[in-house]
Image (tube, helix red, strand yellow):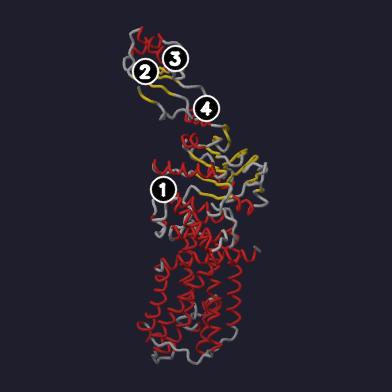
Amino acid sequence: MSSLSLALRDSSTMLRRNLLHARRYPSLTLNLLLTPIMLLLLFVYIFGDTMSAGIGGGRPDRSEYIAYIVPGLLLMTIGSTTIGTAVSVSNDMTEGIIARFRTMAIHRGSVIVGHVIGSVLQSVVSVVLVGAVAVAIGFRSTDATVLEWLAAFGLLVLFSMALTWIVVGMGLVSPNAEAASNNAMPLILLPLLSSAFVPIDAMPGWFQPIAEYQPFTPAIETLRGLLLGTEIGTNGWLAVAWCLGLAVLGYFWSTSKFNDDPK
Amino acid sequence: MTDPAIAANGLRKSYGDKTVLDGVDLAVPEGTIFSLLGPNGAGKTTAVKVLSTLISPDPASGRIRVGGHDLTTAPQAVRAAIGVTGQFSAVDGLITGEENMLLMADLHHLSRLEGRQVTAELLERFDLTEAAKKPASTYSGGMKRRLDIAMTLVGNPRIIFLDEPTTGLDPRSRHTMWQIIRELVSDGVTVFLTTQYLEEADELADRIAVLNDGKIAAQGTAEELKRLIPGGHVRLRFTDPAAYQSAASALREVTCDDESLTLQLPSDGSQRELRSILDRLDSNGIEADELTVHTPDLDDVFFALTGGTAIPTQPKEAAR
């Protein structure tokens, strides 16, 4: 068997294993969905009037605020799902079965690739679920073209792939599940420091560059533009660059960590 | 193939300045059971990890070949020839026993049909058919080990590493495991077994190496190892110091332990020798409170070689 088809076959076997875990034990994935859904409901129904009044210049408009925060929350959902990935990778590495995989004549990277693809698929499902809640409470993106929809979807997949490669590395270097969860925590906190809930120009001046150039903001602005027709500007390229950069970094980090002798 | 299944020259492994394996030489002929025996922390597991490609040997090691392939230059070829059952269960607890088996079949690139056949056969052979649909995490210790070995066998490995396969098992499961290991070898498979139970090595292994402090302290068949140390002895215990003193002078060649009032004299444990000892005691009107016969076993070898002579465990003694 050629090395490429070996890699494909073993990776798809590992993917099946990870999906089986996710299907058999959905509670971890579902728990992680609670955070973005609760934040969505909290910001819309509890803070919605004040937030929208602040952004809209004094006139409270909750439905407009739903539109504003949904793109950020969709990306936050990805951040939240990847925390679960860090935990499950870390857990997995303590299992004897990984040692068994390492002593088998299989494609070495397939263990990690299985985790990455599994996690991206879970992110997509999570995004669809959170998106459905958003639509149920009044989010609409009816002005977007099919092409824009596809591009938005592509961005979500690319973004989740980038974060997943990073968290796989985090899971590999974490000694246990708690540490993995803590290490991946910034991924759910970063959206709070982005343009997800309030516009950047409403933030203190010294903080604006940080909020503007961290990976979430360009992705949020691009998604907002694609779904709602706001200005995208350079954010599109910035978002893609962040995603590719993080994915490549995470890929090399994770594979080199996995190839190290286990402790 | 004239090559031994496993051949290691000067195998070394250290972590920082802590040397775990300090130049181990091993040769395991094909189709035999080789047992690496040693106390906890001797480096047994590290040896298995290196030989099974899980961790790399130190660069200062000599040539190491497993299944005819060089460990460092052709690890994938080594992996294709071996199967490993580690000390800690290498099953996926989150999925069922059957799913674990099918996972192995997929990773060995068997067709769906072959995979199902092999899975059904091995589950049957290891008495796991009934538990096949239950998550492996719910299995008992013995069942997990059996599943573990069944998974190892999916790819028909020619060389199998078993790292302490019976540690923590109850006596019945241990005997089942021994039976399994014997069957493996009858199929021509080479087994590399580590254990801390001397009885197990004695029972199963064609050759035994005693590992102590990262070095092979002795190597050979169980019989050869037993010949390395002084033979058996008879031990007499007294409660009356006067009887103890007169026995000590009546019997020659005794080792005295004044504190516990115990005498020890070399003996092969034969009826004739025992009778002569008893006759001598009788003719002097001495009665011992306890007489025990100790025949040499691997325990003696083990304690003599691993410096554990202070440990007073002698399970093979039969009180008379």
SS at circle 2: loop
User: Mark 4 is on which residue type?
Assistant: Lys
Which x, y percent locates residue B242?
33, 11
Q: Which residue position is annotated with label 2?
A: B261
Verify CB contact (< 8 Å) between mark 1 and mark 2: no
Q: Nearer the viewer, mark 1 or mark 2?
A: 1
The correct choice, above or below, for B117 with respect to A207 in the image is above
Labels 3 and 2: the sequence-earlier one: 3
How packed mark 2 is, by other alpha carbons closer than 10 Å (few <14, some 14-19, many 20 or more), is some
Q: Which residue position is annotated with label 4?
A: B226
Nearest the viewer among A23 and A51 is: A23
How packed mark 3 is, by other alpha carbons closer than 10 Å (few <14, some 14-19, many 20 or more), is some
Which x, y percent locates residue B293?
41, 22
User: Mark 1 is on which residue type?
Assistant: Gly
Marks 1 and 3, how far apart in space? 46 Å
Which x, y percent locates residue A166?
55, 67
Q: Which residue position is annotated with label 1?
A: B142
Say the numbered circle drawn on residue B254.
3
Residue at mark 4 shares a chain with residue at mark 2: yes
Residue sitting at x 39%, y 59%: B134
